[in-house]
Image (spheres, coloured by chain):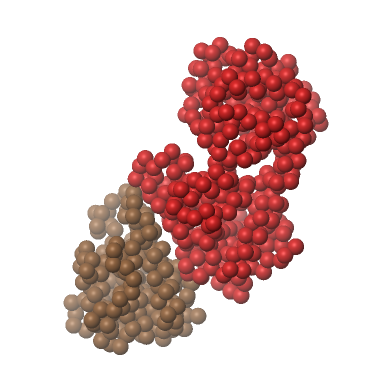
Amino acid sequence: MKVILLSWEFPPRIVGEMAIYVNSLASNLVKKGFNVYVVTYHDSLNGLSTCEDGVKVFRVNNPVDCHTNVLTWSLTLNGNFEKAVVEILEKEGSNQTIIDAHEWLTVSAAVSIKKTFDIPLIFTIHSIEDYRSNYAETPLSITIKSLEWLGIYVADKVIVRSENLKKDLCNLYRVPKDKITVVDWFNPSWIDNMVSLYKEFLSKNFS
Amino acid sequence: METFPGKVILLSWEFPPRIVGGIASHVYELSRNLSMLGVDVTVITFSSPETKKYENIDGVEVFRVPPYDFPAPDFASKILMTNLNIKQKAIEVLKANKDKPKIIHAHDWLVAIAAISLKNLFKIPLVTTLHSTEYGRANGLPSNYNKMIHQIESWLVSESLKVVCCSRYMSQSICKEFGIEDSKVTVICNGINPQKFRKKGNNHNPGDVRSLFADSDEKLVLFVGRLVSEKGLNVLLEAFPRVLQKVNAKLIVVGDGYLKEEILKRAWSYGFPDKIYVTGFLDEKILNQLYVAADVCVVPSLYEPFGLVALEAMAAKTPVIASDVGGLSEIVEHGKTGIKVQPNNPTLLADSIIDVLKGGKDIDRMVKNAYKKIVNEYSWRIVAEKTKNLYIDILKCC
Protein backbone atom coordinates (compact mmCIF):
# COMPACT_ATOMS: atom_id res chain seq x y z
CA MET A 1 0.00 0.00 0.00
CA LYS A 2 1.46 3.27 -1.15
CA VAL A 3 0.44 6.78 -0.15
CA ILE A 4 1.73 9.82 -2.03
CA LEU A 5 1.24 13.04 -0.08
CA LEU A 6 1.37 16.33 -1.98
CA SER A 7 2.20 19.37 0.12
CA TRP A 8 3.79 22.73 -0.63
CA GLU A 9 5.58 22.66 2.73
CA PHE A 10 7.51 19.94 4.52
CA PRO A 11 10.45 20.17 6.95
CA PRO A 12 12.96 21.71 6.72
CA ARG A 13 10.72 24.14 4.82
CA ILE A 14 8.10 25.14 7.37
CA VAL A 15 5.66 27.93 6.50
CA GLY A 16 2.73 27.07 8.75
CA GLU A 17 1.50 24.09 10.71
CA MET A 18 0.72 22.05 7.61
CA ALA A 19 4.40 21.03 7.35
CA ILE A 20 4.25 19.63 10.88
CA TYR A 21 0.97 17.87 10.22
CA VAL A 22 2.10 16.25 6.95
CA ASN A 23 5.36 15.20 8.62
CA SER A 24 3.52 13.56 11.50
CA LEU A 25 1.00 11.87 9.17
CA ALA A 26 3.76 10.52 6.93
CA SER A 27 5.87 9.13 9.74
CA ASN A 28 2.88 7.51 11.48
CA LEU A 29 1.75 5.91 8.23
CA VAL A 30 5.17 4.28 7.81
CA LYS A 31 4.72 2.77 11.27
CA LYS A 32 1.38 1.36 10.11
CA GLY A 33 3.10 -0.41 7.22
CA PHE A 34 2.45 2.04 4.36
CA ASN A 35 5.00 2.91 1.70
CA VAL A 36 4.95 6.70 2.08
CA TYR A 37 6.12 9.35 -0.34
CA VAL A 38 5.91 13.09 0.21
CA VAL A 39 6.19 15.26 -2.90
CA THR A 40 6.99 18.80 -1.89
CA TYR A 41 8.69 22.06 -2.82
CA HIS A 42 12.17 23.26 -1.99
CA ASP A 43 14.15 25.74 -4.04
CA SER A 44 17.54 24.12 -3.55
CA LEU A 45 17.23 20.64 -1.99
CA ASN A 46 15.96 18.65 -4.98
CA GLY A 47 15.42 14.97 -5.66
CA LEU A 48 14.44 11.86 -3.74
CA SER A 49 15.74 11.09 -0.26
CA THR A 50 14.69 8.85 2.62
CA CYS A 51 14.22 10.25 6.13
CA GLU A 52 15.29 8.38 9.29
CA ASP A 53 11.67 7.45 9.97
CA GLY A 54 11.39 5.77 6.57
CA VAL A 55 9.39 8.50 4.81
CA LYS A 56 10.57 9.08 1.23
CA VAL A 57 10.62 12.73 0.29
CA PHE A 58 10.76 13.96 -3.30
CA ARG A 59 11.58 17.66 -3.36
CA VAL A 60 11.25 19.71 -6.53
CA ASN A 61 11.89 23.35 -7.34
CA ASN A 62 9.66 25.70 -9.28
CA PRO A 63 10.59 25.78 -12.98
CA VAL A 64 9.51 29.43 -13.10
CA ASP A 65 10.78 31.61 -10.26
CA CYS A 66 9.47 35.00 -11.34
CA HIS A 67 5.74 35.40 -10.67
CA THR A 68 2.97 37.98 -10.48
CA ASN A 69 1.02 36.12 -7.79
CA VAL A 70 0.90 32.95 -5.67
CA LEU A 71 -1.58 31.38 -8.09
CA THR A 72 0.76 31.37 -11.10
CA TRP A 73 3.53 30.26 -8.71
CA SER A 74 1.53 27.21 -7.69
CA LEU A 75 0.42 26.31 -11.23
CA THR A 76 3.96 26.14 -12.60
CA LEU A 77 5.21 24.32 -9.46
CA ASN A 78 2.55 21.67 -10.01
CA GLY A 79 4.19 20.82 -13.33
CA ASN A 80 7.22 19.58 -11.41
CA PHE A 81 4.98 17.84 -8.83
CA GLU A 82 3.52 15.79 -11.68
CA LYS A 83 6.97 14.94 -12.95
CA ALA A 84 8.01 13.67 -9.51
CA VAL A 85 4.86 11.57 -9.06
CA VAL A 86 5.33 9.99 -12.50
CA GLU A 87 8.89 9.08 -11.53
CA ILE A 88 7.63 7.42 -8.34
CA LEU A 89 4.90 5.51 -10.20
CA GLU A 90 7.36 4.37 -12.86
CA LYS A 91 9.61 2.96 -10.19
CA GLU A 92 6.96 1.40 -7.97
CA GLY A 93 3.91 0.92 -10.20
CA SER A 94 0.51 2.54 -9.71
CA ASN A 95 -1.32 -0.40 -8.12
CA GLN A 96 -2.46 -0.04 -4.52
CA THR A 97 -1.69 3.66 -4.57
CA ILE A 98 -3.55 6.63 -3.17
CA ILE A 99 -2.88 10.37 -3.50
CA ASP A 100 -3.55 12.70 -0.60
CA ALA A 101 -3.29 16.29 -1.83
CA HIS A 102 -3.08 19.12 0.67
CA GLU A 103 -4.73 22.46 -0.04
CA TRP A 104 -5.54 24.23 -3.32
CA LEU A 105 -1.83 24.66 -3.98
CA THR A 106 -1.57 21.04 -5.15
CA VAL A 107 -4.92 20.67 -6.93
CA SER A 108 -3.67 21.08 -10.50
CA ALA A 109 -1.25 18.12 -10.24
CA ALA A 110 -3.58 16.00 -8.09
CA VAL A 111 -6.45 16.21 -10.56
CA SER A 112 -4.41 15.26 -13.61
CA ILE A 113 -2.64 12.38 -11.81
CA LYS A 114 -5.94 10.92 -10.70
CA LYS A 115 -7.36 11.17 -14.23
CA THR A 116 -4.28 9.82 -15.97
CA PHE A 117 -3.56 6.85 -13.72
CA ASP A 118 -7.02 6.19 -12.21
CA ILE A 119 -5.64 6.56 -8.72
CA PRO A 120 -8.04 7.45 -5.91
CA LEU A 121 -7.63 11.03 -4.72
CA ILE A 122 -8.08 12.33 -1.22
CA PHE A 123 -8.14 16.12 -0.90
CA THR A 124 -7.26 17.45 2.55
CA ILE A 125 -8.34 20.99 3.31
CA HIS A 126 -6.74 22.72 6.28
CA SER A 127 -8.25 26.13 5.72
CA ILE A 128 -10.14 27.85 2.93
CA GLU A 129 -9.56 31.02 0.95
CA ASP A 130 -12.61 32.67 2.48
CA TYR A 131 -11.07 32.35 5.97
CA ARG A 132 -7.63 33.51 4.88
CA SER A 133 -8.88 36.46 2.84
CA ASN A 134 -11.77 37.32 5.13
CA TYR A 135 -14.30 36.60 2.36
CA ALA A 136 -12.56 38.83 -0.16
CA GLU A 137 -13.94 38.88 -3.70
CA THR A 138 -10.69 39.92 -5.37
CA PRO A 139 -9.80 38.25 -8.69
CA LEU A 140 -7.02 36.34 -6.95
CA SER A 141 -9.31 34.98 -4.21
CA ILE A 142 -11.97 34.05 -6.75
CA THR A 143 -9.43 32.08 -8.77
CA ILE A 144 -8.08 30.29 -5.71
CA LYS A 145 -11.65 29.38 -4.78
CA SER A 146 -12.11 27.94 -8.27
CA LEU A 147 -9.18 25.62 -7.55
CA GLU A 148 -10.62 24.67 -4.17
CA TRP A 149 -13.88 23.82 -5.92
CA LEU A 150 -12.08 21.78 -8.61
CA GLY A 151 -10.17 19.76 -6.01
CA ILE A 152 -13.34 19.03 -4.05
CA TYR A 153 -15.27 18.15 -7.21
CA VAL A 154 -12.68 15.72 -8.59
CA ALA A 155 -11.55 14.15 -5.30
CA ASP A 156 -13.02 10.85 -4.12
CA LYS A 157 -12.96 12.07 -0.54
CA VAL A 158 -12.42 15.38 1.20
CA ILE A 159 -10.86 15.47 4.66
CA VAL A 160 -11.20 18.43 7.00
CA ARG A 161 -10.25 18.99 10.60
CA SER A 162 -13.51 20.30 12.04
CA GLU A 163 -17.28 20.06 11.76
CA ASN A 164 -17.35 23.83 11.23
CA LEU A 165 -15.17 23.66 8.16
CA LYS A 166 -17.27 20.80 6.83
CA LYS A 167 -20.43 22.86 7.26
CA ASP A 168 -18.88 25.87 5.52
CA LEU A 169 -17.64 23.75 2.61
CA CYS A 170 -21.07 22.21 2.17
CA ASN A 171 -22.64 25.66 2.02
CA LEU A 172 -19.99 27.34 -0.06
CA TYR A 173 -19.28 24.67 -2.67
CA ARG A 174 -22.49 22.65 -2.45
CA VAL A 175 -20.60 19.48 -1.55
CA PRO A 176 -22.65 16.41 -0.60
CA LYS A 177 -22.16 15.89 3.15
CA ASP A 178 -21.03 12.29 2.74
CA LYS A 179 -18.12 13.31 0.56
CA ILE A 180 -16.45 15.10 3.48
CA THR A 181 -14.97 13.27 6.46
CA VAL A 182 -13.91 15.10 9.59
CA VAL A 183 -10.68 13.84 11.12
CA ASP A 184 -9.74 15.54 14.33
CA TRP A 185 -5.96 15.55 14.56
CA PHE A 186 -6.01 16.06 18.30
CA ASN A 187 -7.92 12.85 18.81
CA PRO A 188 -5.51 10.01 19.80
CA SER A 189 -7.14 7.67 17.27
CA TRP A 190 -6.74 10.06 14.30
CA ILE A 191 -4.05 7.99 12.59
CA ASP A 192 -6.18 4.85 12.82
CA ASN A 193 -9.04 6.82 11.29
CA MET A 194 -6.78 7.93 8.46
CA VAL A 195 -5.54 4.38 7.88
CA SER A 196 -9.03 2.94 7.61
CA LEU A 197 -10.06 5.77 5.31
CA TYR A 198 -7.10 5.14 2.98
CA LYS A 199 -7.75 1.39 3.06
CA GLU A 200 -11.37 1.90 2.11
CA PHE A 201 -10.31 3.69 -1.08
CA LEU A 202 -7.39 1.38 -1.82
CA SER A 203 -9.76 -1.56 -1.84
CA LYS A 204 -11.97 0.05 -4.49
CA ASN A 205 -11.23 -0.90 -8.03
CA PHE A 206 -10.76 2.29 -9.98
CA SER A 207 -9.46 1.01 -13.27
CA MET B 1 4.75 8.93 -49.29
CA GLU B 2 5.89 7.63 -45.91
CA THR B 3 2.97 6.84 -43.63
CA PHE B 4 2.77 8.22 -40.15
CA PRO B 5 1.62 5.62 -37.63
CA GLY B 6 0.99 7.93 -34.72
CA LYS B 7 -1.44 10.50 -33.43
CA VAL B 8 -0.62 14.18 -33.04
CA ILE B 9 -2.36 16.37 -30.48
CA LEU B 10 -2.10 20.03 -31.46
CA LEU B 11 -2.68 22.48 -28.61
CA SER B 12 -3.58 26.05 -29.47
CA TRP B 13 -5.37 28.80 -27.59
CA GLU B 14 -7.09 29.99 -30.78
CA PHE B 15 -8.65 28.15 -33.70
CA PRO B 16 -11.28 29.39 -36.19
CA PRO B 17 -13.88 30.73 -35.69
CA ARG B 18 -12.16 31.99 -32.51
CA ILE B 19 -9.47 34.23 -34.02
CA VAL B 20 -7.32 36.45 -31.83
CA GLY B 21 -4.08 36.71 -33.77
CA GLY B 22 -2.17 34.76 -36.37
CA ILE B 23 -1.98 31.38 -34.62
CA ALA B 24 -5.61 30.45 -35.40
CA SER B 25 -5.24 30.36 -39.17
CA HIS B 26 -1.79 28.78 -38.86
CA VAL B 27 -3.07 25.86 -36.80
CA TYR B 28 -6.17 25.57 -39.01
CA GLU B 29 -4.17 25.27 -42.26
CA LEU B 30 -1.44 23.13 -40.71
CA SER B 31 -3.85 20.62 -39.18
CA ARG B 32 -5.98 20.27 -42.35
CA ASN B 33 -2.94 19.79 -44.55
CA LEU B 34 -1.41 17.27 -42.13
CA SER B 35 -4.65 15.35 -42.22
CA MET B 36 -4.57 15.34 -46.04
CA LEU B 37 -1.11 13.77 -45.76
CA GLY B 38 -2.57 10.96 -43.69
CA VAL B 39 -1.56 12.21 -40.25
CA ASP B 40 -4.10 11.54 -37.50
CA VAL B 41 -4.52 15.01 -35.93
CA THR B 42 -6.55 16.18 -32.95
CA VAL B 43 -6.72 19.88 -32.08
CA ILE B 44 -7.58 20.91 -28.53
CA THR B 45 -8.36 24.59 -28.18
CA PHE B 46 -10.35 27.23 -26.26
CA SER B 47 -14.04 27.63 -27.00
CA SER B 48 -15.98 30.85 -27.54
CA PRO B 49 -19.76 31.34 -27.40
CA GLU B 50 -20.34 30.56 -31.10
CA THR B 51 -18.16 27.42 -31.30
CA LYS B 52 -19.01 23.73 -31.16
CA LYS B 53 -17.56 21.49 -28.45
CA TYR B 54 -16.59 18.90 -31.02
CA GLU B 55 -16.14 19.11 -34.76
CA ASN B 56 -14.49 17.15 -37.54
CA ILE B 57 -12.98 19.52 -40.08
CA ASP B 58 -11.53 17.81 -43.16
CA GLY B 59 -10.51 14.83 -41.04
CA VAL B 60 -9.17 16.90 -38.14
CA GLU B 61 -10.80 16.21 -34.78
CA VAL B 62 -11.34 19.50 -32.94
CA PHE B 63 -12.20 19.61 -29.24
CA ARG B 64 -12.96 22.94 -27.63
CA VAL B 65 -12.86 23.51 -23.88
CA PRO B 66 -14.26 26.55 -22.08
CA PRO B 67 -11.79 29.26 -21.12
CA TYR B 68 -11.51 30.14 -17.43
CA ASP B 69 -14.11 32.87 -17.35
CA PHE B 70 -14.15 34.21 -13.80
CA PRO B 71 -12.19 37.28 -12.78
CA ALA B 72 -8.46 36.51 -12.58
CA PRO B 73 -5.51 38.62 -11.39
CA ASP B 74 -4.02 38.99 -14.87
CA PHE B 75 -4.06 37.60 -18.41
CA ALA B 76 -1.45 34.96 -17.63
CA SER B 77 -3.44 33.66 -14.62
CA LYS B 78 -6.50 33.30 -16.83
CA ILE B 79 -4.50 31.45 -19.47
CA LEU B 80 -2.87 29.09 -16.95
CA MET B 81 -6.27 28.28 -15.42
CA THR B 82 -7.70 27.51 -18.86
CA ASN B 83 -4.78 25.16 -19.39
CA LEU B 84 -6.27 22.95 -16.65
CA ASN B 85 -9.31 22.42 -18.89
CA ILE B 86 -7.13 21.75 -21.94
CA LYS B 87 -5.16 19.24 -19.90
CA GLN B 88 -8.23 17.31 -18.72
CA LYS B 89 -9.66 17.01 -22.24
CA ALA B 90 -6.26 15.94 -23.59
CA ILE B 91 -5.93 13.25 -20.90
CA GLU B 92 -9.22 11.74 -22.12
CA VAL B 93 -8.05 11.79 -25.74
CA LEU B 94 -4.66 10.30 -24.90
CA LYS B 95 -6.17 7.52 -22.80
CA ALA B 96 -8.58 6.66 -25.63
CA ASN B 97 -5.60 6.19 -27.99
CA LYS B 98 -3.45 3.97 -25.81
CA ASP B 99 -1.91 1.82 -28.54
CA LYS B 100 -0.68 4.50 -30.91
CA PRO B 101 2.58 6.38 -30.62
CA LYS B 102 1.72 9.98 -29.85
CA ILE B 103 3.21 13.46 -30.12
CA ILE B 104 2.14 16.67 -28.41
CA HIS B 105 2.58 19.80 -30.52
CA ALA B 106 2.19 23.07 -28.59
CA HIS B 107 1.79 26.53 -30.10
CA ASP B 108 3.32 29.29 -27.97
CA TRP B 109 3.49 29.64 -24.17
CA LEU B 110 -0.30 30.02 -23.99
CA VAL B 111 -0.62 26.22 -23.81
CA ALA B 112 2.70 25.60 -22.04
CA ILE B 113 1.60 24.12 -18.74
CA ALA B 114 -0.90 21.74 -20.34
CA ALA B 115 1.67 20.61 -22.91
CA ILE B 116 4.40 20.04 -20.32
CA SER B 117 2.03 18.09 -18.05
CA LEU B 118 0.88 15.81 -20.85
CA LYS B 119 4.43 15.20 -21.97
CA ASN B 120 5.44 14.14 -18.46
CA LEU B 121 2.26 12.25 -17.50
CA PHE B 122 2.21 10.14 -20.66
CA LYS B 123 5.95 10.14 -21.44
CA ILE B 124 5.38 11.30 -24.97
CA PRO B 125 7.53 13.65 -27.02
CA LEU B 126 6.70 17.36 -27.07
CA VAL B 127 7.25 19.68 -30.05
CA THR B 128 6.74 23.41 -29.63
CA THR B 129 6.21 26.04 -32.28
CA LEU B 130 7.20 29.50 -31.08
CA HIS B 131 5.43 32.07 -33.25
CA SER B 132 7.20 34.87 -31.40
CA THR B 133 8.90 35.33 -28.06
CA GLU B 134 8.11 37.57 -25.09
CA TYR B 135 11.53 39.14 -25.48
CA GLY B 136 10.66 40.22 -29.00
CA ARG B 137 7.05 41.19 -28.27
CA ALA B 138 7.85 43.28 -25.20
CA ASN B 139 11.10 44.65 -26.62
CA GLY B 140 13.20 43.24 -23.77
CA LEU B 141 11.76 42.15 -20.44
CA PRO B 142 10.81 45.42 -18.76
CA SER B 143 8.42 44.08 -16.09
CA ASN B 144 8.07 41.16 -13.72
CA TYR B 145 5.14 39.99 -15.81
CA ASN B 146 7.26 39.88 -18.97
CA LYS B 147 9.98 38.01 -17.08
CA MET B 148 7.45 35.43 -15.92
CA ILE B 149 6.21 34.82 -19.47
CA HIS B 150 9.80 34.58 -20.68
CA GLN B 151 10.56 31.97 -18.02
CA ILE B 152 7.45 29.98 -18.92
CA GLU B 153 8.66 30.02 -22.54
CA SER B 154 12.07 28.94 -21.41
CA TRP B 155 10.58 26.06 -19.38
CA LEU B 156 8.51 25.01 -22.41
CA VAL B 157 11.59 25.07 -24.63
CA SER B 158 13.60 22.99 -22.16
CA GLU B 159 10.83 20.35 -21.89
CA SER B 160 10.45 20.17 -25.69
CA LEU B 161 12.33 17.70 -27.82
CA LYS B 162 12.21 20.08 -30.78
CA VAL B 163 11.36 23.74 -31.22
CA VAL B 164 9.91 24.93 -34.51
CA CYS B 165 10.08 28.52 -35.70
CA CYS B 166 9.37 30.36 -38.94
CA SER B 167 12.72 31.82 -40.00
CA ARG B 168 16.47 31.49 -39.49
CA TYR B 169 16.33 34.90 -37.87
CA MET B 170 13.85 33.62 -35.26
CA SER B 171 15.96 30.52 -34.76
CA GLN B 172 18.96 32.68 -33.86
CA SER B 173 16.87 34.77 -31.46
CA ILE B 174 15.50 31.65 -29.77
CA CYS B 175 18.95 30.12 -29.30
CA LYS B 176 20.22 33.38 -27.82
CA GLU B 177 17.22 34.14 -25.60
CA PHE B 178 16.90 30.64 -24.14
CA GLY B 179 20.53 29.53 -24.31
CA ILE B 180 19.92 26.40 -26.39
CA GLU B 181 21.85 24.68 -29.19
CA ASP B 182 20.63 25.40 -32.71
CA SER B 183 20.35 21.65 -33.36
CA LYS B 184 17.21 21.71 -31.22
CA VAL B 185 15.51 24.26 -33.48
CA THR B 186 13.89 23.40 -36.83
CA VAL B 187 12.99 26.20 -39.21
CA ILE B 188 9.71 25.61 -41.02
CA CYS B 189 8.38 28.76 -42.64
CA ASN B 190 4.75 29.77 -42.34
CA GLY B 191 2.52 28.81 -45.21
CA ILE B 192 0.24 30.87 -47.37
CA ASN B 193 -2.78 29.95 -49.45
CA PRO B 194 -2.55 31.84 -52.78
CA GLN B 195 -6.14 30.96 -53.64
CA LYS B 196 -7.24 33.57 -51.11
CA PHE B 197 -6.22 36.22 -53.66
CA ARG B 198 -8.19 36.53 -56.82
CA LYS B 199 -6.11 36.82 -59.99
CA LYS B 200 -5.27 40.28 -61.22
CA GLY B 201 -7.16 41.32 -64.31
CA ASN B 202 -10.27 39.36 -63.40
CA ASN B 203 -13.26 41.10 -61.91
CA HIS B 204 -11.75 44.56 -62.06
CA ASN B 205 -14.91 46.60 -62.34
CA PRO B 206 -15.47 50.13 -61.02
CA GLY B 207 -17.29 48.85 -57.97
CA ASP B 208 -14.16 46.99 -57.08
CA VAL B 209 -12.34 47.46 -53.84
CA ARG B 210 -9.76 49.77 -55.43
CA SER B 211 -12.25 52.58 -55.92
CA LEU B 212 -13.10 52.51 -52.23
CA PHE B 213 -9.60 53.71 -51.44
CA ALA B 214 -8.14 55.65 -54.37
CA ASP B 215 -8.96 57.65 -57.52
CA SER B 216 -8.56 55.81 -60.77
CA ASP B 217 -5.53 57.93 -61.79
CA GLU B 218 -3.74 57.36 -58.47
CA LYS B 219 -1.19 54.58 -58.06
CA LEU B 220 -1.95 52.56 -54.96
CA VAL B 221 0.87 52.08 -52.43
CA LEU B 222 -0.06 49.57 -49.71
CA PHE B 223 1.25 49.25 -46.16
CA VAL B 224 -0.17 46.51 -43.90
CA GLY B 225 0.84 46.11 -40.27
CA ARG B 226 0.37 47.17 -36.70
CA LEU B 227 1.06 50.89 -36.31
CA VAL B 228 4.02 50.48 -33.98
CA SER B 229 7.49 51.85 -34.42
CA GLU B 230 9.23 48.59 -35.37
CA LYS B 231 7.07 48.29 -38.48
CA GLY B 232 8.87 51.35 -39.90
CA LEU B 233 5.89 53.31 -41.17
CA ASN B 234 7.64 56.55 -40.24
CA VAL B 235 10.33 55.77 -42.80
CA LEU B 236 7.69 55.34 -45.47
CA LEU B 237 6.03 58.64 -44.48
CA GLU B 238 9.34 60.46 -44.87
CA ALA B 239 9.84 58.86 -48.26
CA PHE B 240 6.37 59.61 -49.58
CA PRO B 241 6.68 63.35 -50.48
CA ARG B 242 9.59 62.43 -52.76
CA VAL B 243 7.41 59.77 -54.43
CA LEU B 244 4.61 62.30 -54.95
CA GLN B 245 6.95 64.66 -56.80
CA LYS B 246 7.28 62.01 -59.52
CA VAL B 247 4.08 59.94 -59.41
CA ASN B 248 0.44 60.57 -58.54
CA ALA B 249 -0.02 58.01 -55.77
CA LYS B 250 -2.01 57.23 -52.66
CA LEU B 251 -0.71 55.56 -49.54
CA ILE B 252 -3.15 53.09 -47.98
CA VAL B 253 -2.27 52.15 -44.41
CA VAL B 254 -4.08 49.07 -43.08
CA GLY B 255 -3.74 48.44 -39.37
CA ASP B 256 -4.04 50.10 -36.03
CA GLY B 257 -1.77 50.98 -33.15
CA TYR B 258 -0.44 53.62 -30.85
CA LEU B 259 1.21 55.57 -33.70
CA LYS B 260 -2.02 56.30 -35.53
CA GLU B 261 -2.40 59.93 -34.47
CA GLU B 262 1.23 60.73 -35.04
CA ILE B 263 1.02 59.30 -38.55
CA LEU B 264 -1.88 61.54 -39.49
CA LYS B 265 -0.09 64.58 -38.02
CA ARG B 266 3.02 63.78 -39.98
CA ALA B 267 1.07 63.41 -43.21
CA TRP B 268 -0.24 66.96 -42.60
CA SER B 269 3.15 68.40 -41.85
CA TYR B 270 4.70 66.74 -44.91
CA GLY B 271 1.87 68.23 -46.97
CA PHE B 272 -0.02 65.18 -48.21
CA PRO B 273 -3.06 64.72 -45.95
CA ASP B 274 -5.17 63.90 -49.02
CA LYS B 275 -2.72 61.28 -50.24
CA ILE B 276 -2.90 58.96 -47.23
CA TYR B 277 -5.78 56.79 -46.04
CA VAL B 278 -5.48 55.04 -42.67
CA THR B 279 -8.14 52.33 -42.74
CA GLY B 280 -7.68 50.66 -39.36
CA PHE B 281 -8.23 46.89 -39.31
CA LEU B 282 -9.97 45.56 -42.40
CA ASP B 283 -12.08 42.52 -43.01
CA GLU B 284 -9.86 39.76 -44.39
CA LYS B 285 -11.73 39.50 -47.68
CA ILE B 286 -11.41 43.21 -48.40
CA LEU B 287 -7.77 43.18 -47.40
CA ASN B 288 -7.08 40.28 -49.74
CA GLN B 289 -8.65 42.20 -52.62
CA LEU B 290 -6.68 45.27 -51.67
CA TYR B 291 -3.48 43.24 -51.88
CA VAL B 292 -4.45 42.37 -55.46
CA ALA B 293 -5.46 45.94 -56.35
CA ALA B 294 -2.28 47.55 -54.99
CA ASP B 295 0.44 48.68 -57.40
CA VAL B 296 3.15 48.10 -54.82
CA CYS B 297 3.27 46.73 -51.28
CA VAL B 298 5.89 48.31 -49.02
CA VAL B 299 7.20 46.53 -45.91
CA PRO B 300 9.61 49.04 -44.32
CA SER B 301 10.01 47.15 -41.00
CA LEU B 302 12.90 47.76 -38.63
CA TYR B 303 12.22 44.41 -36.82
CA GLU B 304 10.41 41.46 -38.39
CA PRO B 305 10.59 37.82 -37.20
CA PHE B 306 8.87 36.46 -40.30
CA GLY B 307 7.25 38.93 -42.71
CA LEU B 308 3.86 37.49 -43.61
CA VAL B 309 2.78 40.74 -45.31
CA ALA B 310 5.49 40.35 -47.96
CA LEU B 311 4.35 36.78 -48.63
CA GLU B 312 0.72 37.83 -48.95
CA ALA B 313 1.62 40.52 -51.47
CA MET B 314 3.71 38.01 -53.42
CA ALA B 315 0.81 35.56 -53.42
CA ALA B 316 -1.43 38.37 -54.69
CA LYS B 317 1.03 39.03 -57.53
CA THR B 318 1.81 42.52 -56.33
CA PRO B 319 5.40 43.85 -56.39
CA VAL B 320 7.06 43.98 -52.97
CA ILE B 321 9.58 46.43 -51.59
CA ALA B 322 10.90 45.24 -48.23
CA SER B 323 13.62 46.33 -45.87
CA ASP B 324 16.57 44.01 -45.42
CA VAL B 325 15.82 42.79 -41.86
CA GLY B 326 14.96 39.57 -39.99
CA GLY B 327 12.72 37.08 -41.72
CA LEU B 328 12.00 39.52 -44.54
CA SER B 329 15.57 39.18 -45.82
CA GLU B 330 14.98 35.46 -46.21
CA ILE B 331 11.70 35.83 -48.10
CA VAL B 332 12.57 38.60 -50.56
CA GLU B 333 15.51 38.01 -52.90
CA HIS B 334 16.64 41.35 -54.28
CA GLY B 335 16.03 41.76 -57.98
CA LYS B 336 14.56 38.29 -58.25
CA THR B 337 11.37 38.11 -56.20
CA GLY B 338 11.15 41.71 -55.08
CA ILE B 339 13.21 44.70 -54.10
CA LYS B 340 15.16 44.91 -50.87
CA VAL B 341 16.22 48.24 -49.41
CA GLN B 342 18.43 49.24 -46.55
CA PRO B 343 16.21 49.67 -43.47
CA ASN B 344 15.55 53.21 -42.26
CA ASN B 345 16.63 54.89 -45.52
CA PRO B 346 13.74 57.06 -46.84
CA THR B 347 15.56 58.28 -49.97
CA LEU B 348 16.39 54.80 -51.21
CA LEU B 349 12.90 53.64 -50.34
CA ALA B 350 11.32 56.51 -52.29
CA ASP B 351 13.46 55.81 -55.37
CA SER B 352 12.50 52.12 -55.29
CA ILE B 353 8.81 52.97 -55.03
CA ILE B 354 9.07 55.41 -57.97
CA ASP B 355 10.85 52.77 -60.03
CA VAL B 356 8.16 50.18 -59.42
CA LEU B 357 5.27 52.61 -59.98
CA LYS B 358 6.79 53.78 -63.25
CA GLY B 359 6.82 50.17 -64.37
CA GLY B 360 10.54 49.38 -64.24
CA LYS B 361 11.32 46.74 -66.83
CA ASP B 362 12.02 43.82 -64.50
CA ILE B 363 8.94 44.20 -62.36
CA ASP B 364 6.75 41.70 -64.21
CA ARG B 365 9.44 39.05 -64.09
CA MET B 366 9.94 39.58 -60.32
CA VAL B 367 6.22 39.28 -59.67
CA LYS B 368 6.11 36.01 -61.62
CA ASN B 369 9.15 34.65 -59.78
CA ALA B 370 7.67 35.70 -56.46
CA TYR B 371 4.43 33.89 -57.15
CA LYS B 372 6.34 30.79 -58.23
CA LYS B 373 8.32 30.96 -55.00
CA ILE B 374 5.11 31.12 -52.96
CA VAL B 375 3.67 28.08 -54.68
CA ASN B 376 6.92 26.10 -54.50
CA GLU B 377 8.15 26.97 -51.04
CA TYR B 378 5.37 28.47 -48.96
CA SER B 379 2.33 26.36 -49.68
CA TRP B 380 0.65 24.82 -46.64
CA ARG B 381 1.16 21.42 -48.21
CA ILE B 382 4.91 21.92 -48.09
CA VAL B 383 4.74 23.24 -44.54
CA ALA B 384 2.70 20.17 -43.58
CA GLU B 385 5.14 17.82 -45.35
CA LYS B 386 8.08 19.31 -43.47
CA THR B 387 6.16 19.08 -40.20
CA LYS B 388 5.20 15.48 -40.88
CA ASN B 389 8.85 14.62 -41.58
CA LEU B 390 9.77 16.19 -38.26
CA TYR B 391 7.13 14.01 -36.52
CA ILE B 392 8.51 10.89 -38.27
CA ASP B 393 12.07 11.73 -37.16
CA ILE B 394 10.86 12.25 -33.61
CA LEU B 395 9.08 8.89 -33.45
CA LYS B 396 12.19 7.19 -34.86
CA CYS B 397 14.39 8.55 -32.10
CA CYS B 398 11.91 7.87 -29.25
Q: Closest to the observer: B78 or B376? A: B376
| Residue at figure coordinates x 73%, y 15% from the top left | B217
Indicate whether B98 appears above or below B78: below
| Number of numbered discs on residues | 0
| Residue at figure coordinates x 48%, y 26% from the top left | B259
- Outermost residue on the right side: it is B202
Residue A90, quarter of the rendered image: bottom left
Q: If the image is split into quadrants, where does the C terminus of chain B sit?
A: bottom right
Indicate whether B109 appears above or below B355: below
Q: Closest to the observer: B130 or B350? A: B350
| Residue at figure coordinates x 51%, y 70% from the top left | B122
Q: Closest to the observer: B140 or B361? A: B361
Q: Is residue B141 visible?
A: yes
Indicate whether B32 appears above or below A39: above
| Drawn side of residue A207 relative to residue A137, left or right | right
From the top left corner, tell me how far across and down residue B292 is, in percent: 72, 31
Indicate whether B349 appears above or below A126: above
- Outermost residue on the bottom side: it is A33
Q: If the image is split into quadrants, where does the N terminus of chain B sit?
A: bottom right
Chain given the colour red: B
From the top left corner, tell me how far across and down residue A178 is, in percent: 36, 75
Colour assigned to chain A in the rendering is: brown
Q: Is residue A8 visible?
A: no
| Residue at figure coordinates x 66%, y 59% from the top left | B388
From the top left corner, tell me how far across and down residue B154 is, in percent: 44, 54
